[in-house]
Image (tube, coloured by chain):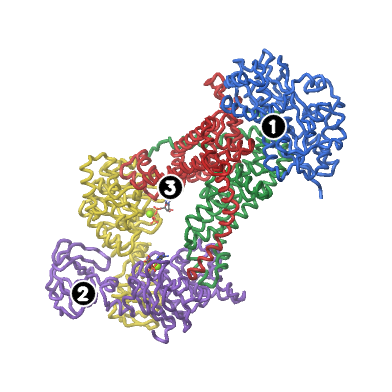
Chain colours: A blue, B green, C red, D yellow, E purple
Amino acid sequence: QQRTLTVSGFGLNQNLIDKNITRPFEARCNCKIVWEVGNNADRLAKLAARKDNPNVDVALLGDYFAQLAANQGLLERLDTSKLSNLNELYDFAKNPLGGNFAVAFTTYAISIAYRTDKITTPITSWRDLWRPELKGRIALPNITTTQGPPVVWLVNRAFGGTDTNVNPGFERLSALKANVVTYYNQSAQLAGLFAQEEVWAAPVGRFAWGNLLATGKPLAWARLSEGQAGVSNVAVLVKGSRNQELAYQFIDFIISREVQTAQANDLVDSPVNRNVRVSADKAAQLTYGLQQIASLRTVDPDYIIKVRDAWIQRWNREVAR
Amino acid sequence: MRESRFPIVMLGLALLFLVGPFVVVFISAFSGDRTLAFPPSSFSLQWFAKVLTVEAFQASFVTSLWLGVLSTLLALLMGIPVAYALARYQVPGAEVIRVILTSPLILPALMVGLALLRYFVLIGNNSISIGLLIGHTALLLPYAVRVVSASLANLPRDIEDAAMSLGANRLQTFFRVVLPNIRGGVAAASVLAFITSFNQVPVSLFLTGPGVSTLPIQMLLYMEYTYDPTIAALSTLLILFSILFVLLTERLLGISKYV
Amino acid sequence: MLSQSPARLAAWILLSPALLFVAVFFLLPVVALLLESFHVGQTYGLNNYLAFFADDFNREVYWRTLWISLLVTLVSALVCYPAAYAVLKINPRWRGLIIGLIILPLMTSPVARTYTWLVVLGREGIVNKSLIETGLLQEPLRILFTEWAVFIGLLQLMMPLMLLSLVSAMENLPKDVVPAARSLGASEGQVFWRVILPLTREGLVVGGTLVFTGCVTAYVTPALLGGPRVTMLATLLYQKAGVTVDYAAAAVISVVMLLTTLLVNFLLRGRAAKTARAA
Amino acid sequence: MNMSDFLSLENLTLAYAKGTAAVEGLHLGVAEGELVSLLGPSGCGKTTTMRAIAGLLVPRAGVVQLAGQNITHLPTNKRDIGMVFQSYALFPHLSTFENVAFGLRLRRVEKSELEHRVMEALRTVGLADFAERLPAQLSGGQQQRVALARAFVIRPRLLLLDEPLSNLDAKLRLEMRAELRRIQRELGITMLYVTHDQGEALALSDRIVIMRLGRIEQMGTPEEVYAKPKTSFVAHFMGWDNLYPLETIAGVVGLPASTGYTHASWRPEAVLTGSGDLQGRVLARTYQGESVEYLLESPFGSVKAVVAVEQAQWHEGQTLNFALPAEKAALLKG
Amino acid sequence: MNMSDFLSLENLTLAYAKGTAAVEGLHLGVAEGELVSLLGPSGCGKTTTMRAIAGLLVPRAGVVQLAGQNITHLPTNKRDIGMVFQSYALFPHLSTFENVAFGLRLRRVEKSELEHRVMEALRTVGLADFAERLPAQLSGGQQQRVALARAFVIRPRLLLLDEPLSNLDAKLRLEMRAELRRIQRELGITMLYVTHDQGEALALSDRIVIMRLGRIEQMGTPEEVYAKPKTSFVAHFMGWDNLYPLETIAGVVGLPASTGYTHASWRPEAVLTGSGDLQGRVLARTYQGESVEYLLESPFGSVKAVVAVEQAQWHEGQTLNFALPAEKAALLKG
Ligand SMILES: Nc1ncnc2c1ncn2[C@@H]1O[C@H](COP(=O)(O)OP(=O)(O)OP(=O)(O)O)[C@@H](O)[C@H]1O
Ligand SMILES: Nc1ncnc2c1ncn2[C@@H]1O[C@H](COP(=O)(O)OP(=O)(O)OP(=O)(O)O)[C@@H](O)[C@H]1O
Ligand SMILES: [Mg+2]
Ligand SMILES: [Mg+2]
């Protein structure tokens, strides 16, 4: 009987992921991969709900969601000796949460994607989102998404707030309501919103860029004066998984050079394997290279976890209505 | 005898509102563009081809099909005896029984899905597939009871008495006389139940897991991830499927009586 | 008919599988969920409800759900009355086709049906395009992700139920009462107000209950057409249970939904009964 | 058509949708105060004719005149024609009083007059004590009387009744028949009465119109149509059960053979038994209380004879002599 | 109860659920080959009695015996009692042939015999050519004949017929009545026949049982119950329309006043008109074809008289002499 590995993933570009990961891995391991897809919050909720009787082996999560999962005791510590490709990764990717709970398989910048034909003065700052010409034309990530809290954090910073005083950020975001069409729950929704002309500009993670370009609309990736924030996606092993051996093989596989190269070339995920080489024009569409990665202002998962619940409350009350 | 045109105009508007959007989707489904826009700038069949290749759709279509068939069967197996007992015996507390059996219709379906997930799947530690089957069966049971009851009400009791006077016992009477005469109602109930299950979202929403998902849920997911006309093509297929069903069932069974 | 007790036994044998099934697999979990909504620490109380309604975001969601549902019910009644009347008067030859067109949406996946509105109502959608082309609008209207989008989606989703209820109520009008009223001197309008309306009130109640309940509990439409800005009870329920894993809150929302639909159901029925008694 | 006719139908042709005509080229005149019955088998077009008079159906051709006015295209509610339906068609949501008051309210009759007229009408039909009941709380006969009161209280120029008694049981039907006749006499109202029961038509009508396949077959007083049927159809309908082709029977009973007629017929009561030169064997003997009905087998066909019970001495299987008296024969065309 | 009775009901008390008894203390015996009618108004318990005999209702008390065997608690399907229903109760999904074959198939009758017997039965009711039709494709009369064939083809020991003709129209009812009688004679089958139509009961029965409020009011041959009613109820039911308290009428017509009877009654046909020492004013005159019915107003109440049409010279409002011959009176108790 064939073995089955259940992987919880994002679902974005699933067809490309199937091409680059699912099918090659299935061929190699003579097993079957079953995907459970959804946004981070959804999937974390499911992991938590099934804590005592997990039905997922490997989960791919945003870094602070993985941290949340680790805090709730949902994760197994990784035996890194079973990951032969680990040493090819940039150092920050090897143990991003500490305690060997996770391995990062991609990292990405968060910035603003915008329509160059509609917005003639390029967007260069978070503050540009408040331009009157954008009335009813922007989408923000919902607070429960992975990008939600980092965007709040970045905006707060841009308007002079600090980690202990987030009032400037929330006040400004509340004032942004008139410009917001909707708050998105999936980065993937953005492609639709751009394609249907509902939205001209939106903060988004770099991983969705390929998807956005596919709409065929003239789009640019804003170079923000405040700099870009960086977030990693990590792979974790779910506690109680009954397919640990396969799970390690899978994690090792997705950080391998060949997979990381394939994913990068399809603009699915920016690579964290230092041996990956891509052409210059691909590189321009990705968060690529140690230099660029180093320039990102990393958002501290621990901080976000600490403030998230309060932010969700506040967001619901002051922003999302 | 000049009659006011107002009612006809309202009917026309109502129908336009109900069915008009389908036309837009039909046309979008044949788009040759990469993303959804209306009207499309060119036409092709590519999105229909795509529907057939998306694995999630294939798998969930099969799941939905099985789920629909099994839950319909279960609902009928339990519902027909209920309809018969309520129609033919003076059961004490018949009203209470009716309320209990129609409660799945009254309760918000999301609540049902949640309750099953929480207590049946998570706490009771049963598989999601079974939970899904139970949720759907419970939801279809009222339809089965109602539609079969309606057709039993049209079946004169006399013919059962006649069968018994001719020497048939109760079982023989049921299988030789009652069942053949309510098969229209049973067929209508099956169709209605199957369609209801096949289109169900709220109950299924909570009762999906890795590898277990229904077509509507996959469509929802897909729509969150992709904004191309694939869903338009799939919707078109589903609408055509519905038209076929409506034509067939309205002609054969007059299903509008039971909706 | 055998003697009384074997008949009763037979009835129970026929009834018990379904009753057991519903009781064990269905009512038990639901009742557990109901109880959970009252669960506070080790005891029971209304704290969860108080907490839920103390949050003005939740209150806003509740009122929004309520008024959108009521508006959909009202508008569909207003549109469907004349429409149902027309269905009856139309040449029987077309009748089947029209009934078919009414049932068609009911038999189509609500996901597909809601999806159509994404295409139709968008800023590049056919509604905005034609309004702009005819010069009625300068700028495209923002409809998607507003309460109006949810209203329109729900209206289309639920209207067939109202229409069918009213059509069947009118079909069951006693034979010849309309010609009788005409022969007594009633114009068409008078026939409608004095005979048809009072005699189809039951259909209105049934249709109204179906539509209202459907609106309060609908998930797909507010989720797709409203988005997080237009949270409704159903989407909030999903968020609580599926995203924030707050089962107590989710249970509270379920109960609030249930009570709201039961209450409206009860009120509508009460009205109908009262008018019936008065008459 | 007679100029003095109160209601006149001229060359009326009626059809449903695109079907063939249900009624064709109908001419009929009704004098004021007259009660005329339309009698005929199911599907002959009685209801269709009524509907056209009421304005519920637009004629394909022809004219409907009432009191000298062409009303062919007047809407129903402007015609002032009362209707009583087989199904009663009472408004189930209104009390007896309100049912009867319905037409008066539409005419904005002033309150005290309205009450007076409604109660007067209810008294006429003997239902003054039932004013507050809903239709569902009345028996069939009572409902029919409410329908009648509702129709005549508006003082219609004409009252149309479509098989008003056919949903009642036999005893009640007889009672209501008398009642109806009384009310018609009392109010002097012109009535057109549809029925397929010949007894009812005979008992009630000033004139009977016998219809067949959308046309008038014979028209006349009850005595005329009962005693002098002109066609086999009318004869059969009126109970002339012994009907034979003239060529068969003429020689046997001594009637002239070729006179332009096709059939001869005798009522069962006209058959002489116990004497005569014809012979028949008793096939069946049916006791009817006052009389016995014999079914006889004879060389030219079966014969039905009704015999007073005192003279009914023959039993099944016996043979008896009988006669078909030539002077009691009806000679028929077609 | 007679020992030779084929069917006997002894002290039968029947009730629905917890209600009061619908039939109480009924005694009835039916001889083999006899056709007995149960006659009575709606609700008097005729159907209830039938259902108990068929085993569809368990008696609250009493015994049902058939051919000497106590069958009170035998299930319906073991009784071998055929039933024919007012609604026909044909199986809508089965052809005429299969409807008739139903009981034989349950008895596992061998194929060629089954075909033979079914076709035989269909020939008996004249429907051999309709074997393949579905019930919906048959007329009412044909359906009723299928129901009859279906019931007697299993050679039941007893045939129960519950108003089998009441859904047919008047003409057809007469035809089927004769047919039924013929078949009963032919097959020699014992029948219990329920009806509320006195004409039907008179025409068909060997014996008539008149029921009222769940009890037997009178029982006898058709001639007995028609000509010699014992109670007002039976008299009224049998068309003795002129019914007066004995104390009122005795002096007027010269009957002895106190003889233990309470009422005297005359049939309308027994009233003498044109002579006699009583006087009456014509209230209504109803033409009936052969005869005219007069409703007369007299000092002791209204009188109904039926007069042959030739002698019916009086008109409404006129006064005429009449007589109630003492020798034609029925004296009644209660
Ligand atoms: N609504 C209708 N549409 C089409 N044809 C009709 C309609 N109503 C009646 N007809 C046809 O018109 C003809 C006359 O029907 P009508 O109802 O006038 O008969 P009727 O004499 O009143 O019979 P009955 O005694 O059965 O009431 C029949 O052939 C009938 O089939
Ligand atoms: N299923 C039932 N449940 C309760 N009471 C019943 C039922 N059927 C009949 N009855 C009552 O029993 C009494 C006798 O009814 P039954 O049907 O025997 O009368 P019937 O003589 O056949 O009358 P009809 O001529 O109307 O058929 C009536 O008072 C009736 O109301
Ligand atoms: Mg008619
Ligand atoms: Mg009965």
> Which amino acid type is marked by label 1?
Thr
Estimate the x, y position of residue D148 in percent, counting from the top left. Answer: 28, 52
Residue placed most toward the observer, E68 or E300: E68
Query: Disc 2 to disc 3, how far (Cα)?
Result: 58 Å
Q: Which residue is mark 3?
A: D16
Same chain, marks 3 and 1?
no
Q: Is residue D88 left or right of residue A115?
A: left
Which dot, 3 or 1, sits closer to the camera?
Answer: 1
Q: Which residue is mark 1?
A: B226
Q: SS of the residue at dot 3?
A: loop
Q: Is residue A147 above or below residue B117?
A: above
Query: Disc 2 to disc 1, how far (Cα)?
Result: 96 Å
> Which amino acid type is marked by label 3?
Tyr
Q: Is residue D12 left or right of residue A85?
A: left
Query: Which of the labelled discs sits on residue E263, or is there none?
Result: 2
Residue lying furthest left: E277
Q: Indicate the quadrant of ligand 3 in the picture.
A: bottom left
Estimate the x, y position of residue D299 in percent, counting from the top left. Answer: 41, 77
Task: Tell me the crowding category of disc 2: few under 14, some 14 to 19, or many 20 or more residues within 10 angstroms, Cα based.
Answer: many
Name the residue located 50 percent from the left edge and 68 percent from the top edge: C5
**Quadrant hosting residue C186:** top left
